Amino acid sequence: FTLHVYLTHVRFMYLFFLLVPIVLAAEIAQQYPSLSLTKWATDRRDGLERFFAERFYQICGVAGVLLLVAT
């Protein structure tokens, strides 16, 4: 029985590491407002970040084409 529990625990351990940040994100955002999405969205952006944000779809398209050409 102990071996079975151990193997089950190890087998599904990745779920623990994936779920913990999702579960804790709301609590962290409430306790530390400087880390929240609303704070991040209202911050000013530098030139490089604005450049990539304005051309996001074009950059993704070029990256996709380059990936197809490379394979």
Image: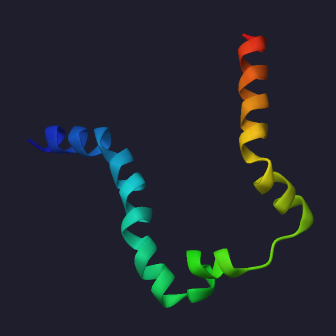
Residue 46, percent from left and from top:
88, 69
Whether residue 59 is visible, yes or no, is yes
Q: Using the image, determine if residue 12 lies above or below residue 26.
A: above
Instruction: Name which residue lies at 76% across and 56% down.
Output: 53
Q: Is residue 7 left or right of residue 35?
A: left
Instruction: Name which residue lies at 86% across and 56% down.
Output: 51
Residue 23, percent from left and from top:
36, 68
Q: Is residue 29 left or right of residue 40?
A: left
Residue 37, percent from left and from top:
57, 74
Q: Front-most of 22 and 71? A: 71
Instruction: Name which residue lies at 34% across and 49% down.
Output: 15
Residue 26, percent from left and from top:
42, 76
Q: In this view, does 30 lie to the left or right of 4?
A: right
Dividing the image into 4 quarters, which one contains the N terminus? top left
Whether residue 36 is visible, yes or no, is no
Q: In this view, does 30 lie to the left or right of 67?
A: left
Instruction: Name which residue lies at 79% across and 29% down.
Output: 62
Q: Using the image, determine if residue 55 lies above or below residue 60.
A: below
How are the colours assigned in the image? Answer: rainbow
Q: Front-most of 69 and 21? A: 69
Quadrant location of residue 22? Answer: bottom left
Q: Using the image, determine if residue 58 lies above or below residue 13.
A: above
Dividing the image into 4 quarters, which one contains the C terminus? top right
Quadrant location of residue 5? Answer: top left
